[in-house]
Image (tube, rainbow, N blue to C red):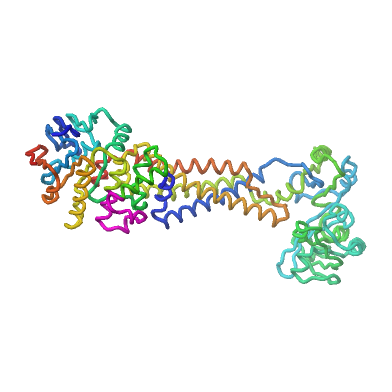
Amino acid sequence: MSDSMVQVRDVTKVYERGKQKIEVLHRLTLDIGKGEFVALMGPSGSGKTTLLNLIGGLDQPSAGQVTVGGCPLDQLSGSRLAHWRARNIGFVFQFYNLMPVLSAEGNVELPLLLTHLSAAQRRSNVAAALQVVGLADRAKHKPRELSGGQEQRVAIARALVSDPQLLVCDEPTGDLDRQTADDILGLLQVLNRDHGKTIVMVTHDPKAADFAGRRLHLEKGQLMEQAA
Amino acid sequence: MTRAGFVVANLFRRKTRTILTVLSVIMAFLLFGLLQSLSHLFNAGADFVGATRLVTQARVSFTQPLPLSMVPKLEAVPGVARVAYSQWFGGVWQTNTQVFTFAIDPLRYHDVYPEFVMPEEQWKAFADTRTAMIAGKLVADEYGWHVGQRIPLSSNIYPQKNNSKSWAFDLVGIYDGKDENWRKQANAVFINHDYFDEANLFGKGRTNFFILKLANGADAEAISKTIDAMFENSTDETKTQTERDFNLGFIKQIGDIGLMVRWILFAVFFTLLLVVGNTMAQSVRERVPELAVMKTLGFTDSGVLALVLAESLVLCLGGGLAGLALATMLGATVEKATGGQFQLRVDAFVWSVGLATILLMSLAVGLLPALRARRLRIVDALAGRL
Protein backbone atom coordinates (compact mmCIF):
# COMPACT_ATOMS: atom_id res chain seq x y z
CA MET A 1 0.00 0.00 0.00
CA SER A 2 1.24 3.53 -0.71
CA ASP A 3 1.91 5.97 2.13
CA SER A 4 -1.07 6.59 4.45
CA MET A 5 -3.14 9.62 3.72
CA VAL A 6 -5.69 8.90 6.41
CA GLN A 7 -5.00 7.11 9.69
CA VAL A 8 -7.88 6.42 12.05
CA ARG A 9 -6.74 4.94 15.33
CA ASP A 10 -9.11 3.52 17.89
CA VAL A 11 -11.73 6.15 17.23
CA THR A 12 -14.96 6.26 19.17
CA LYS A 13 -17.68 8.84 18.61
CA VAL A 14 -20.53 9.33 21.04
CA TYR A 15 -23.37 11.80 20.47
CA GLU A 16 -25.42 13.17 23.30
CA ARG A 17 -29.08 13.77 22.53
CA GLY A 18 -30.55 15.19 25.69
CA LYS A 19 -29.85 12.64 28.41
CA GLN A 20 -29.24 9.87 25.88
CA LYS A 21 -25.74 8.93 24.73
CA ILE A 22 -25.49 7.27 21.34
CA GLU A 23 -22.25 5.57 20.37
CA VAL A 24 -21.98 5.88 16.62
CA LEU A 25 -18.40 4.65 16.14
CA HIS A 26 -16.71 2.10 18.39
CA ARG A 27 -12.90 1.84 18.55
CA LEU A 28 -12.53 2.04 14.81
CA THR A 29 -9.14 1.74 13.15
CA LEU A 30 -8.33 2.03 9.46
CA ASP A 31 -5.79 3.34 6.98
CA ILE A 32 -6.35 4.94 3.59
CA GLY A 33 -3.34 5.29 1.35
CA LYS A 34 -2.38 8.21 -0.84
CA GLY A 35 -4.04 7.99 -4.21
CA GLU A 36 -6.66 5.50 -3.09
CA PHE A 37 -10.34 5.68 -4.03
CA VAL A 38 -12.24 4.17 -1.12
CA ALA A 39 -15.98 3.59 -0.81
CA LEU A 40 -17.47 3.58 2.70
CA MET A 41 -20.58 1.45 2.70
CA GLY A 42 -23.08 0.28 5.26
CA PRO A 43 -26.71 0.48 6.29
CA SER A 44 -28.32 3.65 7.50
CA GLY A 45 -27.04 4.56 10.97
CA SER A 46 -23.87 2.53 10.63
CA GLY A 47 -21.65 5.58 11.13
CA LYS A 48 -20.45 6.20 7.57
CA THR A 49 -21.19 9.92 7.51
CA THR A 50 -19.87 10.30 11.05
CA LEU A 51 -16.58 8.71 10.00
CA LEU A 52 -16.49 10.91 6.92
CA ASN A 53 -17.04 14.00 9.07
CA LEU A 54 -14.15 13.01 11.33
CA ILE A 55 -11.83 12.41 8.38
CA GLY A 56 -12.89 15.71 6.85
CA GLY A 57 -12.20 17.62 10.07
CA LEU A 58 -15.83 18.62 10.51
CA ASP A 59 -16.08 16.96 13.88
CA GLN A 60 -13.82 15.59 16.60
CA PRO A 61 -13.84 12.00 17.97
CA SER A 62 -14.87 11.33 21.54
CA ALA A 63 -11.79 9.12 21.80
CA GLY A 64 -8.96 8.03 19.53
CA GLN A 65 -7.10 9.94 16.88
CA VAL A 66 -7.58 10.88 13.27
CA THR A 67 -4.53 11.87 11.25
CA VAL A 68 -4.85 13.18 7.71
CA GLY A 69 -1.83 13.92 5.57
CA GLY A 70 0.37 13.54 8.60
CA CYS A 71 -1.61 16.11 10.60
CA PRO A 72 -3.30 14.90 13.80
CA LEU A 73 -6.66 16.63 13.70
CA ASP A 74 -7.22 16.51 17.44
CA GLN A 75 -4.44 19.08 17.82
CA LEU A 76 -6.37 21.56 15.73
CA SER A 77 -9.50 23.35 16.73
CA GLY A 78 -11.56 26.37 15.84
CA SER A 79 -10.00 28.60 13.22
CA ARG A 80 -6.87 26.44 12.79
CA LEU A 81 -9.04 23.48 11.82
CA ALA A 82 -10.98 25.70 9.41
CA HIS A 83 -7.74 26.88 7.79
CA TRP A 84 -6.57 23.27 7.55
CA ARG A 85 -9.80 22.23 5.82
CA ALA A 86 -9.46 25.09 3.34
CA ARG A 87 -6.00 23.89 2.27
CA ASN A 88 -6.34 20.13 2.47
CA ILE A 89 -9.90 18.89 2.00
CA GLY A 90 -12.45 19.15 -0.78
CA PHE A 91 -16.07 18.33 0.08
CA VAL A 92 -18.76 17.00 -2.23
CA PHE A 93 -22.26 16.66 -0.79
CA GLN A 94 -25.28 14.66 -1.84
CA PHE A 95 -27.40 17.74 -2.45
CA TYR A 96 -24.58 19.80 -4.02
CA ASN A 97 -24.95 22.66 -1.48
CA LEU A 98 -24.08 25.36 -3.97
CA MET A 99 -24.71 29.04 -3.15
CA PRO A 100 -27.86 29.92 -5.11
CA VAL A 101 -26.89 33.60 -5.34
CA LEU A 102 -23.60 32.86 -7.13
CA SER A 103 -22.92 31.67 -10.64
CA ALA A 104 -21.04 28.44 -11.28
CA GLU A 105 -17.75 30.29 -11.42
CA GLY A 106 -18.66 32.28 -8.30
CA ASN A 107 -19.33 29.06 -6.42
CA VAL A 108 -16.05 27.54 -7.57
CA GLU A 109 -14.18 30.72 -6.61
CA LEU A 110 -15.63 30.80 -3.08
CA PRO A 111 -12.89 28.72 -1.42
CA LEU A 112 -10.23 30.83 -3.14
CA LEU A 113 -11.44 33.94 -1.28
CA LEU A 114 -9.65 32.41 1.70
CA THR A 115 -6.31 32.46 -0.12
CA HIS A 116 -3.94 35.27 -1.02
CA LEU A 117 -4.33 34.71 -4.75
CA SER A 118 -4.96 37.74 -6.92
CA ALA A 119 -8.26 38.12 -8.73
CA ALA A 120 -6.60 37.13 -12.00
CA GLN A 121 -5.09 34.00 -10.47
CA ARG A 122 -8.39 33.07 -8.91
CA ARG A 123 -10.14 33.43 -12.28
CA SER A 124 -7.48 31.26 -13.90
CA ASN A 125 -7.82 28.49 -11.26
CA VAL A 126 -11.60 28.60 -11.52
CA ALA A 127 -11.47 28.28 -15.30
CA ALA A 128 -9.11 25.30 -14.98
CA ALA A 129 -11.37 23.57 -12.43
CA LEU A 130 -14.45 24.06 -14.59
CA GLN A 131 -12.51 22.75 -17.58
CA VAL A 132 -11.62 19.57 -15.68
CA VAL A 133 -15.27 18.87 -14.90
CA GLY A 134 -16.37 19.79 -18.43
CA LEU A 135 -18.44 22.87 -17.55
CA ALA A 136 -16.37 25.73 -18.90
CA ASP A 137 -19.30 26.83 -21.08
CA ARG A 138 -21.69 27.08 -18.12
CA ALA A 139 -19.51 29.29 -15.94
CA LYS A 140 -21.94 32.21 -15.84
CA HIS A 141 -25.02 30.15 -15.05
CA LYS A 142 -26.65 30.14 -11.64
CA PRO A 143 -27.36 26.76 -9.97
CA ARG A 144 -31.08 27.02 -10.75
CA GLU A 145 -30.13 27.12 -14.44
CA LEU A 146 -28.16 23.85 -14.25
CA SER A 147 -29.24 20.22 -14.18
CA GLY A 148 -28.55 18.03 -11.13
CA GLY A 149 -25.54 16.46 -12.78
CA GLN A 150 -24.16 19.84 -13.76
CA GLU A 151 -24.63 21.18 -10.26
CA GLN A 152 -22.70 18.24 -8.87
CA ARG A 153 -19.91 18.89 -11.38
CA VAL A 154 -19.74 22.48 -10.17
CA ALA A 155 -19.58 21.16 -6.61
CA ILE A 156 -16.70 18.87 -7.61
CA ALA A 157 -14.93 21.80 -9.29
CA ARG A 158 -15.37 23.79 -6.07
CA ALA A 159 -13.89 20.89 -4.13
CA LEU A 160 -10.90 20.71 -6.50
CA VAL A 161 -10.08 24.36 -7.00
CA SER A 162 -7.80 24.67 -3.94
CA ASP A 163 -5.94 21.53 -5.09
CA PRO A 164 -6.63 19.59 -1.88
CA GLN A 165 -4.93 16.30 -1.01
CA LEU A 166 -8.17 14.58 -0.16
CA LEU A 167 -11.68 14.63 -1.61
CA VAL A 168 -14.44 13.66 0.80
CA CYS A 169 -17.73 12.76 -0.90
CA ASP A 170 -20.95 12.09 0.98
CA GLU A 171 -23.37 10.20 -1.30
CA PRO A 172 -22.36 12.30 -4.32
CA THR A 173 -24.72 10.44 -6.64
CA GLY A 174 -27.60 9.97 -4.19
CA ASP A 175 -29.77 12.55 -5.91
CA LEU A 176 -28.94 11.67 -9.53
CA ASP A 177 -30.30 9.29 -12.13
CA ARG A 178 -28.21 6.29 -13.13
CA GLN A 179 -26.65 7.75 -16.24
CA THR A 180 -25.74 11.03 -14.58
CA ALA A 181 -24.47 9.19 -11.52
CA ASP A 182 -22.16 7.10 -13.70
CA ASP A 183 -20.85 10.27 -15.34
CA ILE A 184 -20.06 11.79 -11.97
CA LEU A 185 -18.43 8.64 -10.72
CA GLY A 186 -16.43 8.41 -13.92
CA LEU A 187 -15.23 11.95 -13.27
CA LEU A 188 -14.18 11.00 -9.76
CA GLN A 189 -12.27 8.07 -11.22
CA VAL A 190 -10.43 10.38 -13.59
CA LEU A 191 -9.55 12.68 -10.72
CA ASN A 192 -8.22 9.73 -8.78
CA ARG A 193 -6.39 8.03 -11.61
CA ASP A 194 -5.09 10.93 -13.65
CA HIS A 195 -4.80 13.68 -11.02
CA GLY A 196 -3.74 11.52 -8.08
CA LYS A 197 -6.52 12.64 -5.74
CA THR A 198 -7.24 10.49 -2.72
CA ILE A 199 -11.00 10.02 -2.53
CA VAL A 200 -13.17 8.77 0.33
CA MET A 201 -16.74 8.30 -0.76
CA VAL A 202 -19.75 7.34 1.36
CA THR A 203 -22.35 5.44 -0.62
CA HIS A 204 -25.09 2.90 -0.06
CA ASP A 205 -25.13 2.07 -3.79
CA PRO A 206 -23.11 -1.01 -4.76
CA LYS A 207 -22.92 0.20 -8.37
CA ALA A 208 -21.34 3.42 -7.18
CA ALA A 209 -18.92 1.47 -5.02
CA ASP A 210 -17.79 -0.42 -8.14
CA PHE A 211 -16.03 2.72 -9.28
CA ALA A 212 -13.87 2.70 -6.16
CA GLY A 213 -10.66 0.72 -5.75
CA ARG A 214 -11.55 -0.50 -2.25
CA ARG A 215 -14.71 -0.93 -0.21
CA LEU A 216 -15.03 -0.57 3.55
CA HIS A 217 -18.16 -1.89 5.25
CA LEU A 218 -19.39 -0.36 8.47
CA GLU A 219 -22.04 -1.78 10.68
CA LYS A 220 -23.11 -0.42 14.03
CA GLY A 221 -20.03 1.78 14.19
CA GLN A 222 -17.51 -0.94 13.50
CA LEU A 223 -15.52 -1.87 10.45
CA MET A 224 -16.76 -5.28 9.30
CA GLU A 225 -14.64 -6.03 6.29
CA GLN A 226 -12.48 -4.53 3.65
CA ALA A 227 -12.76 -5.56 0.03
CA ALA A 228 -10.55 -4.58 -2.84
CA MET B 1 -15.99 37.67 -7.31
CA THR B 2 -14.94 39.34 -4.08
CA ARG B 3 -16.11 39.07 -0.46
CA ALA B 4 -17.88 42.40 -0.93
CA GLY B 5 -19.58 41.05 -4.02
CA PHE B 6 -20.62 37.95 -2.09
CA VAL B 7 -22.09 40.13 0.66
CA VAL B 8 -24.12 42.16 -1.83
CA ALA B 9 -25.24 39.01 -3.68
CA ASN B 10 -26.55 37.55 -0.43
CA LEU B 11 -28.43 40.74 0.36
CA PHE B 12 -30.33 40.48 -2.89
CA ARG B 13 -31.28 36.83 -2.64
CA ARG B 14 -34.78 38.11 -1.86
CA LYS B 15 -34.90 41.26 -3.97
CA THR B 16 -38.33 42.47 -2.88
CA ARG B 17 -37.59 42.02 0.79
CA THR B 18 -34.27 43.81 0.53
CA ILE B 19 -35.66 46.67 -1.54
CA LEU B 20 -38.53 47.24 0.89
CA THR B 21 -36.15 47.12 3.83
CA VAL B 22 -33.76 49.59 2.19
CA LEU B 23 -36.68 51.91 1.43
CA SER B 24 -37.71 51.88 5.07
CA VAL B 25 -34.13 52.71 6.08
CA ILE B 26 -34.05 55.54 3.51
CA MET B 27 -37.31 57.00 4.89
CA ALA B 28 -36.08 56.75 8.45
CA PHE B 29 -32.84 58.60 7.69
CA LEU B 30 -34.61 61.15 5.50
CA LEU B 31 -36.79 61.97 8.50
CA PHE B 32 -33.77 61.87 10.76
CA GLY B 33 -31.84 64.34 8.59
CA LEU B 34 -34.70 66.80 8.29
CA LEU B 35 -35.86 66.58 11.89
CA GLN B 36 -32.35 66.81 13.31
CA SER B 37 -31.78 69.93 11.19
CA LEU B 38 -35.07 71.32 12.41
CA SER B 39 -34.16 70.63 16.01
CA HIS B 40 -30.71 72.11 15.46
CA LEU B 41 -32.31 75.18 13.89
CA PHE B 42 -34.55 75.76 16.88
CA ASN B 43 -32.06 74.94 19.56
CA ALA B 44 -29.00 76.61 18.13
CA GLY B 45 -27.86 79.68 19.96
CA ALA B 46 -28.64 83.12 18.61
CA ASP B 47 -26.47 84.08 15.68
CA PHE B 48 -26.10 87.83 15.28
CA VAL B 49 -23.38 87.66 12.66
CA GLY B 50 -24.34 89.66 9.57
CA ALA B 51 -27.64 90.88 11.02
CA THR B 52 -28.67 94.29 9.62
CA ARG B 53 -32.02 94.39 11.43
CA LEU B 54 -33.19 93.38 14.87
CA VAL B 55 -36.67 92.80 16.24
CA THR B 56 -37.66 93.94 19.71
CA GLN B 57 -40.73 92.38 21.31
CA ALA B 58 -42.04 92.00 24.84
CA ARG B 59 -39.90 89.55 26.76
CA VAL B 60 -42.91 87.52 27.82
CA SER B 61 -44.43 87.09 24.38
CA PHE B 62 -44.83 89.01 21.13
CA THR B 63 -48.58 88.99 21.75
CA GLN B 64 -47.93 91.42 24.62
CA PRO B 65 -47.89 94.88 22.98
CA LEU B 66 -45.20 97.45 23.73
CA PRO B 67 -45.73 101.24 24.01
CA LEU B 68 -44.92 103.39 21.01
CA SER B 69 -43.20 105.73 23.46
CA MET B 70 -40.24 103.33 23.24
CA VAL B 71 -39.46 104.53 19.70
CA PRO B 72 -37.30 107.57 20.57
CA LYS B 73 -35.47 105.57 23.23
CA LEU B 74 -34.71 102.85 20.70
CA GLU B 75 -33.59 105.36 18.10
CA ALA B 76 -31.25 106.91 20.64
CA VAL B 77 -29.29 103.64 21.03
CA PRO B 78 -25.92 103.95 19.24
CA GLY B 79 -25.93 101.83 16.11
CA VAL B 80 -29.68 102.01 15.55
CA ALA B 81 -30.34 103.91 12.32
CA ARG B 82 -34.15 103.79 12.14
CA VAL B 83 -37.04 102.19 13.98
CA ALA B 84 -40.28 100.87 12.49
CA TYR B 85 -43.12 99.08 14.23
CA SER B 86 -45.71 96.49 13.34
CA GLN B 87 -48.99 95.43 14.91
CA TRP B 88 -50.74 92.20 14.03
CA PHE B 89 -54.24 92.92 12.70
CA GLY B 90 -55.34 89.37 11.88
CA GLY B 91 -57.09 90.02 8.60
CA VAL B 92 -59.80 87.84 7.09
CA TRP B 93 -61.01 88.39 3.55
CA GLN B 94 -64.48 87.29 2.46
CA THR B 95 -65.70 84.37 4.57
CA ASN B 96 -62.60 82.87 6.10
CA THR B 97 -59.58 83.53 3.92
CA GLN B 98 -56.75 84.43 6.30
CA VAL B 99 -54.56 87.29 5.11
CA PHE B 100 -51.37 88.28 6.96
CA THR B 101 -52.25 91.87 7.87
CA PHE B 102 -50.13 94.25 9.93
CA ALA B 103 -50.60 97.86 10.96
CA ILE B 104 -47.43 99.88 10.30
CA ASP B 105 -46.06 103.41 9.95
CA PRO B 106 -45.63 103.55 6.14
CA LEU B 107 -42.59 105.81 5.95
CA ARG B 108 -40.71 104.12 8.77
CA TYR B 109 -41.39 100.70 7.26
CA HIS B 110 -40.27 101.93 3.83
CA ASP B 111 -36.95 103.07 5.39
CA VAL B 112 -36.38 99.85 7.32
CA TYR B 113 -37.31 97.48 4.49
CA PRO B 114 -35.75 98.80 1.26
CA GLU B 115 -36.05 95.24 -0.04
CA PHE B 116 -39.77 95.77 -0.61
CA VAL B 117 -40.15 97.82 -3.79
CA MET B 118 -43.13 99.92 -4.82
CA PRO B 119 -43.46 103.14 -6.86
CA GLU B 120 -42.76 106.14 -4.63
CA GLU B 121 -46.13 107.70 -5.40
CA GLN B 122 -47.78 104.60 -3.98
CA TRP B 123 -45.69 104.87 -0.80
CA LYS B 124 -46.77 108.50 -0.56
CA ALA B 125 -50.42 107.61 -1.10
CA PHE B 126 -50.07 104.99 1.63
CA ALA B 127 -48.60 107.52 4.04
CA ASP B 128 -51.11 110.27 3.17
CA THR B 129 -54.32 108.22 3.09
CA ARG B 130 -55.48 107.14 6.55
CA THR B 131 -57.62 104.27 5.30
CA ALA B 132 -54.98 103.13 2.85
CA MET B 133 -53.58 99.65 2.54
CA ILE B 134 -50.87 98.06 0.39
CA ALA B 135 -50.71 94.41 -0.57
CA GLY B 136 -47.86 92.11 -1.54
CA LYS B 137 -47.87 91.06 -5.19
CA LEU B 138 -48.38 87.41 -4.25
CA VAL B 139 -51.55 88.28 -2.33
CA ALA B 140 -52.86 90.71 -4.94
CA ASP B 141 -52.35 88.22 -7.74
CA GLU B 142 -53.96 85.42 -5.78
CA TYR B 143 -57.14 87.35 -4.99
CA GLY B 144 -57.26 89.47 -8.11
CA TRP B 145 -56.84 92.79 -6.28
CA HIS B 146 -55.79 95.94 -8.09
CA VAL B 147 -54.95 99.47 -7.06
CA GLY B 148 -58.05 101.61 -6.55
CA GLN B 149 -60.19 98.87 -5.08
CA ARG B 150 -61.80 99.15 -1.68
CA ILE B 151 -61.03 95.89 0.10
CA PRO B 152 -63.22 94.72 2.97
CA LEU B 153 -61.23 92.93 5.67
CA SER B 154 -62.42 91.75 9.03
CA SER B 155 -60.16 91.28 12.02
CA ASN B 156 -59.91 88.20 14.18
CA ILE B 157 -59.04 90.37 17.16
CA TYR B 158 -59.80 94.06 16.80
CA PRO B 159 -63.31 95.47 16.47
CA GLN B 160 -63.86 99.09 15.51
CA LYS B 161 -65.21 101.50 18.06
CA ASN B 162 -68.72 100.61 16.85
CA ASN B 163 -67.98 96.97 17.88
CA SER B 164 -67.94 95.80 14.31
CA LYS B 165 -65.03 93.57 13.28
CA SER B 166 -65.61 94.51 9.66
CA TRP B 167 -63.11 96.99 8.30
CA ALA B 168 -62.53 98.31 4.78
CA PHE B 169 -59.39 99.75 3.26
CA ASP B 170 -58.36 101.48 0.07
CA LEU B 171 -55.76 99.58 -1.89
CA VAL B 172 -53.30 102.27 -2.95
CA GLY B 173 -50.26 100.18 -3.80
CA ILE B 174 -48.89 96.76 -4.58
CA TYR B 175 -45.34 96.02 -3.45
CA ASP B 176 -42.93 93.34 -4.61
CA GLY B 177 -39.52 92.03 -3.55
CA LYS B 178 -36.26 93.32 -5.01
CA ASP B 179 -35.06 89.81 -5.90
CA GLU B 180 -36.32 86.28 -6.02
CA ASN B 181 -35.87 85.69 -2.29
CA TRP B 182 -37.77 88.85 -1.37
CA ARG B 183 -40.45 88.30 -3.99
CA LYS B 184 -41.35 85.13 -2.08
CA GLN B 185 -41.98 87.31 0.98
CA ALA B 186 -44.36 89.73 -0.74
CA ASN B 187 -47.22 87.87 0.90
CA ALA B 188 -48.56 90.32 3.51
CA VAL B 189 -50.99 93.23 3.66
CA PHE B 190 -50.17 96.48 5.49
CA ILE B 191 -52.58 99.09 6.82
CA ASN B 192 -51.90 102.49 8.34
CA HIS B 193 -51.10 102.21 12.06
CA ASP B 194 -52.37 105.70 12.87
CA TYR B 195 -55.81 104.88 11.45
CA PHE B 196 -55.90 101.49 13.16
CA ASP B 197 -54.77 102.98 16.48
CA GLU B 198 -57.50 105.60 16.40
CA ALA B 199 -60.32 103.43 15.07
CA ASN B 200 -59.95 100.22 17.09
CA LEU B 201 -61.89 99.59 20.26
CA PHE B 202 -58.98 98.23 22.33
CA GLY B 203 -55.69 99.87 23.42
CA LYS B 204 -53.98 102.83 21.94
CA GLY B 205 -50.40 103.71 21.42
CA ARG B 206 -49.03 100.21 21.46
CA THR B 207 -47.58 97.79 18.98
CA ASN B 208 -46.53 94.13 18.88
CA PHE B 209 -42.91 94.61 17.92
CA PHE B 210 -40.30 97.08 16.70
CA ILE B 211 -38.01 96.52 13.75
CA LEU B 212 -34.65 98.19 14.15
CA LYS B 213 -32.54 98.99 11.12
CA LEU B 214 -28.88 99.00 12.13
CA ALA B 215 -26.18 101.37 10.95
CA ASN B 216 -23.42 99.92 8.77
CA GLY B 217 -20.95 97.93 10.83
CA ALA B 218 -23.06 98.06 13.96
CA ASP B 219 -22.60 95.31 16.48
CA ALA B 220 -25.98 93.62 16.46
CA GLU B 221 -25.36 91.49 19.52
CA ALA B 222 -24.16 94.42 21.61
CA ILE B 223 -27.15 96.55 20.55
CA SER B 224 -29.51 93.71 21.41
CA LYS B 225 -28.04 93.47 24.90
CA THR B 226 -28.10 97.24 25.37
CA ILE B 227 -31.77 97.50 24.50
CA ASP B 228 -32.86 94.63 26.71
CA ALA B 229 -30.78 95.95 29.58
CA MET B 230 -32.41 99.36 29.10
CA PHE B 231 -35.89 97.97 29.76
CA GLU B 232 -34.96 95.34 32.31
CA ASN B 233 -37.05 95.48 35.46
CA SER B 234 -39.55 97.82 33.80
CA THR B 235 -43.22 97.03 33.15
CA ASP B 236 -42.32 96.45 29.51
CA GLU B 237 -39.27 94.20 29.53
CA THR B 238 -37.99 93.42 26.08
CA LYS B 239 -36.39 90.66 24.10
CA THR B 240 -34.32 91.81 21.13
CA GLN B 241 -33.26 89.23 18.58
CA THR B 242 -32.50 88.71 14.92
CA GLU B 243 -35.36 88.49 12.43
CA ARG B 244 -34.60 84.82 11.90
CA ASP B 245 -34.95 83.99 15.58
CA PHE B 246 -38.07 86.12 15.79
CA ASN B 247 -39.66 84.14 12.92
CA LEU B 248 -38.67 80.85 14.54
CA GLY B 249 -40.36 82.01 17.71
CA PHE B 250 -43.74 81.69 16.00
CA ILE B 251 -43.16 78.02 15.38
CA LYS B 252 -41.77 77.42 18.86
CA GLN B 253 -45.19 78.36 20.15
CA ILE B 254 -46.35 74.90 19.10
CA GLY B 255 -44.27 73.35 21.84
CA ASP B 256 -40.83 72.00 22.69
CA ILE B 257 -39.72 71.24 19.15
CA GLY B 258 -36.58 69.44 20.33
CA LEU B 259 -38.54 67.08 22.56
CA MET B 260 -41.11 66.37 19.85
CA VAL B 261 -38.35 65.61 17.36
CA ARG B 262 -36.64 63.24 19.79
CA TRP B 263 -39.82 61.27 20.43
CA ILE B 264 -40.67 61.05 16.73
CA LEU B 265 -37.18 59.82 15.91
CA PHE B 266 -37.28 57.33 18.77
CA ALA B 267 -40.52 55.85 17.42
CA VAL B 268 -39.14 55.78 13.87
CA PHE B 269 -35.89 54.06 14.79
CA PHE B 270 -37.48 51.60 17.18
CA THR B 271 -39.76 50.45 14.36
CA LEU B 272 -36.83 50.37 11.98
CA LEU B 273 -34.84 48.17 14.36
CA LEU B 274 -37.67 45.67 14.37
CA VAL B 275 -38.09 45.72 10.58
CA VAL B 276 -34.41 45.47 9.66
CA GLY B 277 -33.67 43.12 12.55
CA ASN B 278 -36.37 40.79 11.29
CA THR B 279 -34.96 40.93 7.76
CA MET B 280 -31.49 40.00 8.98
CA ALA B 281 -32.78 37.23 11.23
CA GLN B 282 -34.83 35.74 8.40
CA SER B 283 -31.88 35.98 6.06
CA VAL B 284 -29.63 33.98 8.37
CA ARG B 285 -32.35 31.47 9.26
CA GLU B 286 -32.86 30.61 5.56
CA ARG B 287 -29.16 30.13 5.02
CA VAL B 288 -28.16 27.78 7.82
CA PRO B 289 -27.04 24.99 5.43
CA GLU B 290 -25.14 27.48 3.25
CA LEU B 291 -23.36 28.92 6.26
CA ALA B 292 -22.43 25.38 7.31
CA VAL B 293 -21.03 24.72 3.85
CA MET B 294 -18.98 27.90 4.05
CA LYS B 295 -17.50 26.60 7.26
CA THR B 296 -16.68 23.27 5.61
CA LEU B 297 -14.89 25.19 2.86
CA GLY B 298 -12.69 26.78 5.49
CA PHE B 299 -14.48 29.98 6.54
CA THR B 300 -13.86 30.38 10.27
CA ASP B 301 -16.61 31.07 12.80
CA SER B 302 -15.42 34.66 13.03
CA GLY B 303 -15.28 34.92 9.26
CA VAL B 304 -18.92 33.91 8.97
CA LEU B 305 -19.87 36.33 11.75
CA ALA B 306 -18.04 39.10 9.90
CA LEU B 307 -19.88 38.32 6.66
CA VAL B 308 -23.28 38.57 8.32
CA LEU B 309 -22.32 41.82 10.07
CA ALA B 310 -21.05 43.13 6.73
CA GLU B 311 -24.45 42.42 5.17
CA SER B 312 -26.12 44.31 7.98
CA LEU B 313 -23.72 47.22 7.51
CA VAL B 314 -24.20 47.39 3.73
CA LEU B 315 -27.98 47.31 4.16
CA CYS B 316 -28.02 50.10 6.74
CA LEU B 317 -25.28 52.14 5.09
CA GLY B 318 -26.91 52.01 1.66
CA GLY B 319 -30.28 53.11 2.95
CA GLY B 320 -28.89 55.53 5.52
CA LEU B 321 -26.61 57.40 3.14
CA ALA B 322 -29.36 57.66 0.55
CA GLY B 323 -31.75 58.98 3.20
CA LEU B 324 -29.28 61.58 4.45
CA ALA B 325 -28.49 62.64 0.88
CA LEU B 326 -32.20 63.07 0.15
CA ALA B 327 -32.62 65.06 3.35
CA THR B 328 -29.72 67.32 2.33
CA MET B 329 -31.28 67.98 -1.07
CA LEU B 330 -34.74 68.51 0.39
CA GLY B 331 -33.37 70.87 3.05
CA ALA B 332 -31.63 72.93 0.38
CA THR B 333 -34.88 73.04 -1.62
CA VAL B 334 -36.84 74.25 1.43
CA GLU B 335 -34.23 76.90 2.13
CA LYS B 336 -34.39 78.13 -1.47
CA ALA B 337 -38.19 78.03 -1.56
CA THR B 338 -38.48 80.13 1.61
CA GLY B 339 -35.98 82.68 0.39
CA GLY B 340 -33.46 81.67 3.02
CA GLN B 341 -35.90 82.30 5.85
CA PHE B 342 -36.07 78.68 6.83
CA GLN B 343 -32.53 77.29 6.84
CA LEU B 344 -33.03 73.57 7.05
CA ARG B 345 -29.40 72.63 6.60
CA VAL B 346 -28.33 69.03 6.90
CA ASP B 347 -24.82 70.05 7.91
CA ALA B 348 -21.69 68.13 8.87
CA PHE B 349 -22.96 67.73 12.43
CA VAL B 350 -26.17 66.04 11.29
CA TRP B 351 -24.22 63.85 8.85
CA SER B 352 -21.81 62.69 11.55
CA VAL B 353 -24.63 61.91 13.97
CA GLY B 354 -26.38 60.14 11.11
CA LEU B 355 -23.33 58.04 10.26
CA ALA B 356 -22.84 57.08 13.90
CA THR B 357 -26.50 56.08 14.06
CA ILE B 358 -26.11 53.97 10.91
CA LEU B 359 -23.15 52.13 12.42
CA LEU B 360 -24.91 51.54 15.73
CA MET B 361 -28.06 50.38 14.02
CA SER B 362 -26.22 47.95 11.74
CA LEU B 363 -24.57 46.44 14.82
CA ALA B 364 -27.85 46.26 16.70
CA VAL B 365 -29.74 44.49 13.89
CA GLY B 366 -26.86 42.30 12.76
CA LEU B 367 -25.27 41.12 15.97
CA LEU B 368 -27.74 38.43 17.06
CA PRO B 369 -28.06 36.81 13.61
CA ALA B 370 -24.26 37.03 13.23
CA LEU B 371 -23.73 35.31 16.56
CA ARG B 372 -26.18 32.61 15.53
CA ALA B 373 -24.20 32.09 12.34
CA ARG B 374 -20.97 32.00 14.31
CA ARG B 375 -22.24 29.39 16.75
CA LEU B 376 -23.86 26.96 14.34
CA ARG B 377 -22.25 23.52 14.31
CA ILE B 378 -21.41 22.23 10.85
CA VAL B 379 -22.47 18.65 11.44
CA ASP B 380 -25.84 19.58 12.97
CA ALA B 381 -26.54 22.19 10.31
CA LEU B 382 -25.73 19.87 7.41
CA ALA B 383 -27.85 17.11 8.95
CA GLY B 384 -30.80 19.53 9.16
CA ARG B 385 -30.90 19.47 12.93
CA LEU B 386 -30.84 23.30 13.17
Query: Can you give x and y, in whole percent of width and height, for residue A188 in the image?
Result: 21, 47
Query: Can you give x and y, in whole percent of width and height, for residue B119 in the image?
Result: 88, 63
Q: Is residue B91 left or right of residue B197?
A: left
> What stretch of residues is rendered in magenta?
A131-155
The prevailing secondary structure element of the residues shown in magenta is: helix
Q: Is residue B358 left or right of residue B100?
A: left
| Closer to us: B151 or B40 | B40
In magenta stretch: residue A140: yes
Looking at the image, which residue is at 25% across and 52% down?
A152
> In the figure, residue B40 lies in which quadrant?
top right
Q: Is residue B24 left or right of residue B261?
A: left
Query: Can you give x and y, in whole percent of width and height, for residue B74 in the image?
Result: 87, 44
- Is residue B177 in view? yes
| Quadrant housing the C terminus of chain A | top left
B84 to B166, vertically: above or below: above
| Closer to us: A143 or A183 | A183
- Extreme residue in the front direction: A194
A181 to B348, vertically: above or below: below
- Is residue B256 in view? no
Looking at the image, which residue is at 72% across and 64% down?
B98
| Closer to us: B341 or B21 | B21
A102 to B76, vertically: above or below: below
Query: Can you give x and y, in whole percent of width and height, for residue B19 in the image?
Result: 46, 55
